[in-house]
Image (tube, helix red, strand yellow):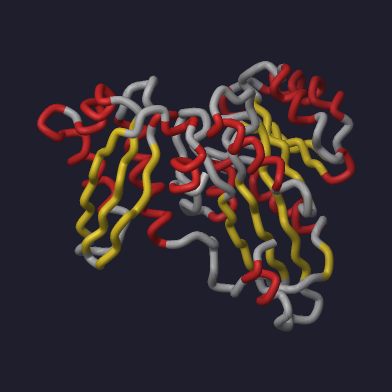
Amino acid sequence: MDNFSENYSSMEAPEGHVSGFVSLVGRPNVGKSTLLNAFFEKKIAIVSDKPQTTRTEIRGVLTGSDFQIVFCDTPGIHKPKTLLGTRLNDTARFTLKEIDLVLFVVEADSVIGKGDRFIAESLPTEKTVLVLNKIDKVKSGRILTQLNEASGFSFSEYFPISASTGEGVKELLGHIKTKLVPGPRYFPENMETDFSESFWVAELVREQLLHEVREELPHSIATRVTDWDWPHIRCEILVERNSQKGIVIGHKGEVLKKVGTEVRKQLKDGAFIELVVKVEKDWQKHPRSLDRFGY
């Protein structure tokens, strides 16, 4: 819990109010961010079909008249190949230290394998709920098979859901509420996330780039807003090689133009996005580069 939430939690909450911190963990690309967005019925975290889309802890604050849930969407835990990968794993594991409930997300349409088991070994069985996501992609027999396989983890509860269609999400949310304990509001009731506007814009730019560029590029792209003088927003895009710079820019700047257009659609009217592409060789391996981008 950061200083802001610690200070704010000293304020009185309504009588009978319950609250808690809930972490979403799992392998990369199992649908954690999609599930977070489904709880809010709006975009809280960027999503794509590329692994490691989430690179920092994204907190979504869901507040009702008598409850507050602080969801922590984490990077997918994986076998790291770079310093960036190591830091992503550290971020994911750090959120488990003072968490009240863990949602361990696995896929209905793929084998529960070594990666899932590796993560499961580090989770507290008594406060972990296994969430079988993407049930919309398989038949009922497959769902039963996956749940039977997952029962070997000995977690407290199991929920089959589809984060993309919403099936089972309300039931899962209702169950989470039953696990909350009497506690304060850690954040103001009108606050849905704890990250800044500039961070959000940089994430929107990265999300659109993930949709546009080739498969080999996603892990090589980082984004950050370097200047905010509304309506002008300057966002820096970092790649690792000159060849990648050309791909990100596109023929006659087509890729950047498309990215800028799609990002502007999600901002207030009048926003102007300046996208600048820079090359920093092997930035994923350098601590200073990772620090600069908040990883």
Q: Is residue 150 left or right of residue 60?
A: right
Quadrant of the image for the N terminus? bottom right
Q: Position of residue 164 (x, y in %)?
A: 53, 38
- Name the foreground residue: 51 vs 31: 51
- Quarter of the rendering containing residue 283: top left
Instruction: Name the residue nearer the viewer: 163 or 99.
Output: 99
* Percent x, y of residue 205: 33, 45
Residue occupying the point 67% across, 33% down: 26
Q: Is residue 29 visible?
A: no
Residue at 23 percent of width and 44 percent of height: 276
* Residue 55 picture location, percent across and down: 52, 41
Q: Residue at x 23, y 46 (%)?
A: 275
Foreground residue among 124 and 84: 84
Q: Position of residue 109 (x, y in %)?
A: 61, 21
Number of marks in the rendered image: 0
Q: Residue at x 26, y 54 (%)?
A: 234
- Left or right, 292 with respect to 237, comes to right
- Examine the rendered structure and indicate whether residue 180 appears above or below residue 259: below
Q: Is residue 179 above or below residue 110?
A: below
Horizontal arrangement in the rendering, residue 238 relative to residue 55 (left or right)? left
Q: Is residue 116 visible?
A: yes
